[in-house]
Amino acid sequence: FGPLGWNIRYAFDESDLETSVAVLRRFIAEQEKMPWEALNYVTGQINYGGRVTDDWDRRCLMAILSIYLTPDILRDDYTFSKSGIYRAPKIGSLNQLVQYFSDLPSTDGPEVFGMHENADVAFNSQESSNLMFTLLSLQPRQTGGGSVGINNDDLVIQLANSYEELCPEILREEEAGPTTFVIQPNGLLTSLAICLSQEMIKFNRLLQTITSSLRDIKQAIRGFIVMSADLDSMHTAFLNNQVPSIWEKVSFASLKSLASWFNDLVFRVQFLRLWLTKGQPLVFPLPVFFFPQGFMTASLQTFARRHQEAIDGLSFKFNILSIPAEEVTEAPQDGVIIHGLYLEGARYNPVSKQIEDSKPGKMFEQLPAIHFIPEVNHIQAPHTFQCPVYKTALRKGVLSTTGMSTNFVVAIELPINPNDGEQKWILAGVAALLNLTD
């Protein structure tokens, strides 16, 4: 099921299973009482966990093992899933065991893994997207003679012209309003103002790359300059509605098609220009940032400077608002109000104020605005699910120098039904996303 299961695909093999079985045999033979906690730790953190590099995958691994490595498995009525189909068979004859395994479904559904039925939809959508990508890559560059209509070169020039018209102007510090870059008594800008200036640098580099490459692709098609490898790749990407690699190198994280990506870019730059000219906004759409982790740190640093607290001891607690982001009339004294997050694998019920199972066929649900409140030595609130937030639905990133994935942003605490427990939502692969695929 792709990222709904593991963020990263691991090469688990028979040796992991054989080692775990050997450890189980040894525990049974040498211990008077089964040390379930030790068995979970050795199997999950060492035998299988030795291959796992992502902390959220490790949490998922331990949640899966807790279904099977538990004293409850010795009860006759214990099942591995709600349907009751999957269970540890009762002691009996060989024929009875063979019959049990013969009666199991030939194809395992999502429920055996603790997932919602929508996981099947996600899998089929992923397979379809991969198929379409392969077909597009096999498509010939130019149609044969005698075809009616516009040729590929003219189409690319038309697209380049339209994107040139849509492309926003670069963000200039000269446009800043009187309250945007205010020098504090200590001679420094506010942390959020520094965050804005850093985002401006990143977006300006992207906008300049777009502007120059659009000009070059038109000149290359007309024969005025050499068609480089980057421009040739850009030509193909335009025909396939994909973001050119020359843009991706300096772009924000996104899995969108070219048209959707460009609309997203325009929205992001519009928000930053509004912040630049009008001053700090009341609410922040977290998806607009190149580096949302930096924005989170800037929010914590603002609190740390105001209250003279060490930033190392700060983290966020969360308050989900009952009003839409558009109806917020004043900024909070501490922290920031965030919106624009999408929940995958579950949905938020504004009536019960808890997360619940997704509706069939509804893959994503938008979360309400959330107040991120800095707190010293924060401890996770009871009856909450620690939900990871990722930039894209791919979830997989590169391990940074901090040991965190570059795709991971922050973990938010979402209220849950006390009867469900966190394990249910871990197995369901619930996560919040900043950017949908399209």
Image (cartoon, rainbow, N blue to C red):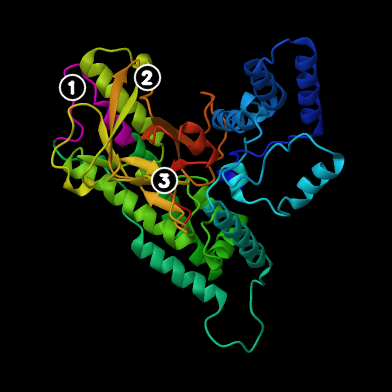
Label whose residue precedes the other's in the sequence (1 or 3): 1
Label whose residue precedes the other's in the sequence (2 or 1): 1
Q: Amino acid at mark 1?
A: Gln
CA gap, disc 1 and disc 3: 38 Å
Snapshot quadrant of residue 74: top right
- Percent of width and height locating residue 164: 38, 63
Q: Nearer the viewer, mark 1 or mark 3?
A: 3
Q: Residues within 10 Å of mark 3 (few under 14, many from 20)?
A: many
Would you place residue 291 above or below residue 270 in this image?
above
**Mark 3 residue element:** strand
**Which of the labelled discs sits on residue 379, or is there none?**
2
Q: Residues within 10 Å of mark 2 (few under 14, many from 20)?
A: few
**Mark 2 residue element:** loop
For the question of whether residue 151 can be seen, the reply is: yes
Residue 297 in the magenta stretch? The answer is no
Residue that appears at 73% across and 54% down: 106
Judge by depth and name the residue closer to the eye, 408 or 208. 408
- Percent of width and height locating residue 83: 59, 47
- Percent of width and height locating residue 111: 59, 47
**Which of the labelled discs sits on residue 184, or is there none?**
1
**Mark 1 residue element:** loop
Residue that appears at 62% across and 36% down: 77
- From the image, tell me which residue sits under label 3: 343
Q: Residues within 10 Å of mark 1 (few under 14, many from 20)?
A: few
Give the extent of the magenta segment. Answer: 179-197
Q: Amino acid at mark 3?
A: Leu
Label whose residue precedes the other's in the sequence (2 or 3): 3
**Is residue 10 found left or right of 114 in the rendered image?**
right
Judge by depth and name the residue closer to the eye, 396 or 178. 396
